[in-house]
Amino acid sequence: MVAITYTVAFEGIEARLVEVQCAVTPGIPAFTIVGLPDKAVSEARERVRAALTAMAIALPSKRITINLSPADLPKEGSHFDLPIAMALLAALEIIPQEDAEQTVALGELSLDGALVPVIGALPAAMAAAQDDRTLLCPHACGPEAAWVGAAKVIAPRSLAEVVRHYTGQNVLTQSEPGEVHNSAGNRDLSEVKGQERAKRALEIAAAGRHHLMLVGSPGSGKSMLAARIPGILPTLSAAEALETSMIHSLSGLLDEGGINRERPFREPHHTASMAAIVGGGRNAKPGEISLAHNGVLFMDEFPEFPRTVLETLRQPIETGEVVVARANAHVRYPCRFMLVAAANPCKCGYLTDPGRACARVPICGEEYMGRISGPLMDRFDLRIEVPPVAFTDLDLPEDGEKSQDVAARVAAARQVQDERFADHPTARVNADAEGHLLDDVATPDEEGRALLVKVAERFGMSARGYHRVLRVARTIADLDGAPDVRRPHVAEAVSYRLAMSKEV
């Protein structure tokens, strides 16, 4: 008799069901795990043996074989401990085999039988719900997995509780979803003195999820402005929160099983490697661009990032997903993020500062900004020069708009876009519109079209740049509450496009 239970193996954010088979047969006593396990899975037999011994369950003097099917799928991680123990308990007829077959289990075992939390409970719950099975996971993972409403989640604290549950001695109740964490920041846009044009650009970028480049001398407020973007972004919808949390679950970033409705804000250091930014490594884990999915990726000191890292951003920016190909893995991660980059205009930083002249004008700026290739710069919808703030302005009281006021306008514009793209699953915001959809929603009036054509011909604007101007103009019209894109909207969009442009 072969006892069967199920677990999952992760490929990107997808959890693939793995059948865990256990056969206890006559022969030389042995405990073998087959089915392409890695080192952590192979070591599960010692943890399972010790946990069963702690429960006063002795293994029979027979040959125990665990098969992880499909056998050609790599099995990685310590979460295979619990399903292996489940299959073995079912094979020994300690728990009912029919209950084990209706269970998807994951969890690490300690030597005393306690269940240790593991990553990936949320995508595992999705897989269990799709296959109409119960998810069995450690107690600490239960609130996270329970966010998948269609899944029945049982979260014991130890292997002994698993046995008592399936033998009817102490039936466990279904886990409840964890708390919704709203990490409201205390950084308000009103704290930024001056920089009205940059604030306007932040509002437009947040409303349509447009990519933004901030260039200015050191201390002009670029990082300060970027740090206040989370305060003007709308909260994640239920679908977006679940999608984003699945990625964070695989990375072990969810706090105490709760779902965070705030949009991610990732700010990697400029020394980060390509694998850290794009994803990869030994197990092809998600990178910063995927962890920023549905949120913001802020890259300060943008030209200081390695050229190879910057160039790898070009395709994910366009497609909204990244494929990490390795010899033993080929996984796909979503990465629809808003890229906000900050840079000094030159190596010394004072090329555009009238009070402190750069010693190597214009070569210093050309060499430094030349580290950003033309095709990558072409993907920024808005390019803003952030001038230094006068010392007299720093002493002025806070009189600018508060973040909550700007956030209200951004939320209203996002609501318009939600209704506009309700029947288009590939588009959520104006930045996603392309092809016929872009023509339908962002075609300007005659005056606006004439202005855009004139500018495109005068400055040699690329086709990508032309379409990005239309998307920004559509967002500006949404912020103004205008149903159609008109000449003033196009004019403002063009002004952001040509600033510091390599097309000029």
Image (cartoon, rainbow, N blue to C red):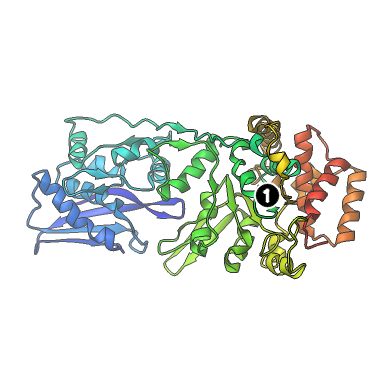
Query: Residue, x 42% and y 31% (percent of image)?
Result: 179
Residue kind at label 1, given as amino acid type: Ser
- Residue toward you, 98 or 419: 419
Q: From the viewer's perspective, is 233 left or right of 484? A: left
Q: From the viewer's perspective, is 247 left or right of 6? A: right
Q: Give the labeled residue for mark 1.
A: 220
Q: The C terminus lies in which quarter of the figure?
A: bottom right
Query: Residue, x 29% and y 57% (percent of image)?
Result: 68
Q: From what the image shows, is residue 369 above or below residue 80?
A: below
Is the residue marked by circle 1 packed among few (<14), some (14-19), or many (20+) residues within 10 Å?
some
Q: From what the image shows, is residue 7 above or below residue 148?
A: below
Q: Is residue 421 visible?
A: yes
Q: x and y percent of residue 465 in the render?
A: 77, 56
Q: x and y percent of residue 351 in the render?
A: 74, 61
**Res 311 → quadrant:** bottom right
Count up the numbered dots. Answer: 1
Q: x and y percent of residue 116 in the render?
A: 27, 45
**Res 63 → quadrant:** bottom left
- Residue toward you, 125 or 349: 349
Q: Is residue 204 visible?
A: no
- Residue toward you, 318 or 128: 318
Q: From what the image shows, is residue 251 above or below residue 179?
A: below
- Residue toward you, 260 or 9: 260
Q: Secondary structure at mark 1?
A: loop
Q: x and y percent of residue 27 in the render?
A: 9, 63
